[in-house]
Image (spheres, rainbow, N blue to C red):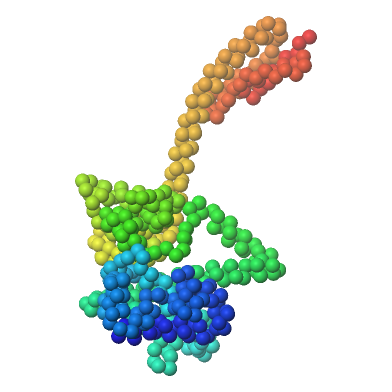
Amino acid sequence: MRRRIHRSMRRRVSRLSLALPSTAAPDLLRGWCPRSLHHAISSPNRFPLDFPLKIVAATGPTQISALRMEHPWHFCNGRIAIIPEGDNQFRYANYSVDDKMKKGPILGVILKQEYPPLIEGTSRTGQRFQYHASKWEHYYHIVRDDGQTQADRVKEEFWSIYSVPVELEDEADQTFEKYGHTQVKNMMYQARLDAVKHFYREIIGSPKSDTFARSKSLGQASKKKNPDGAQNRGGSRPLVETQQYIAAKFGPEKATVINTYCCMKCGVKNCDSSGRAGPIPSERAKQLVDDYNTALQEKYPDDWQEQPFDGKIAYDIGGGLPHGRLAIGAGAVKKAAIIDAAKESAMRPSTSRAYQNLLRRYEEQVANNQCLTEENAALTQQNVSLSQHMKRSDRVLELICHKVQIEIPPDLLEEEVVMRGNIDGSSHASANLVTNSDGPNRYYEIGTNALRLTYG
């Protein structure tokens, strides 16, 4: 029975090896196979997944009993037991840090093996179309000769390795649809990166039009304007699986949703020995965590640190469901219950991008007005000081004129009186007494007028 369960995995690897030349297969497959599969594909005596192939090689009850003792968490009717959790994630019934049968890489291999051929057809208007599959829904578009779609093949292969309790099968089917959608999206994201790396030098070396170069330059400038760009570390575990990893390594008390979220944002490798998250480089992520903790303290002032994850608070601090997901805990909790609770509230946060942009501009304007108010108060104080300094300067000028026995013209005095009145009524006035040596001449500045005295 166990040999039959995992026989499809061996057939799949055999098909991959036969489809390509023996010398080219490892190099071509290395671009998309998980790192743990590289050495297995390169060796003719080994297959990608060690554990299923050990079961295939076991030919008697003694060997299978030994495998049960070596990997007790694998066996639930010959398959790995998982439990659906949240909207699009699964939890291992018995988690082990050293387990190599992680569902993410395995599903990724299955998706690439069962990748649909070029999809072609005719629209209702009679126009021909063709496109490559880029979404999970595209795996349903081609029906094979045996009546199965590529999506059916993926699910058949996946559920030959994993199992769920009978009472959770319907829920698991719904969760797998969303999980498959997420995995295909991640797969295509990585495929685009690999394509850019592969064709980078060819594209850079080819001639490009000014329009193309200008559009790319504007795109780069626009991305650099964001001071807190998105961090995609790549290859990270889902939140639920990261919770189980932290619980196994640091203890279940550290495997809260918030601490797990912080660990994922800073990098699990950057956590300290106690399982506490390191500094988060993203300002937006730090602000979300601070807002969540503040709201949780207001709601549960006595024992807020002991409270489970509150999806309603995550819904509120994130402004609803931008892009259709929670700001914290996306995928690990069910959105339906949170949305129902939000509908009962009198006010719901707006998810409109225009509203969010308007609110951000309003907050920036309020901050600018506050800065201008403080600057105006400082200038007013400076004006008072300068007015006092100007009065002292007038007295000094009178003493100097009396000392050198020079008479100031009346029109200049009238102009100085008018100018003094203007300076007293302005918050941006300034009066300085400046002496500048220039040979036998000296300049005395009061406000904006200069009196030039010449020594004989």
Quarter of the image for the N terminus: give it.
Answer: bottom left
Residue at figure coordinates x 57%, y 83% from the top left? 21
Q: Is residue 39 above or below residue 446?
A: below
Residue 249 point in image, percent of width and height: 33, 57
User: Front-most of 278 and 248?
Assistant: 248
Outermost residue on the front side: it is 62
Quarter of the image for the C terminus: give it.
Answer: top right
Residue 239 point in image, percent of width and height: 35, 62
Report the side of 61 relative to 222 (left or right).
left
Report the side of 312 relative to 437 (left or right).
left
Q: Is residue 25 above or below residue 282?
A: below
Residue at figure coordinates x 21%, y 48% from the top left? 303
Residue 49 point in image, percent of width and height: 41, 75
Residue 179 point in image, percent of width and height: 37, 72
Residue at figure coordinates x 62%, y 70% from the top left? 199
Q: Is residue 293 above or below residue 182?
A: above
Report the side of 455 relative to 391 (left or right).
right
Report the side of 66 relative to 455 (left or right).
left
Quick check: can you spot residue 42?
yes
User: Front-most of 183 and 123?
Assistant: 183
Outermost residue on the bottom side: it is 145
Residue at figure coordinates x 64%, y 62% from the top left? 214
- Count of picture labels: 0
User: Front-most of 40 and 432?
Assistant: 40
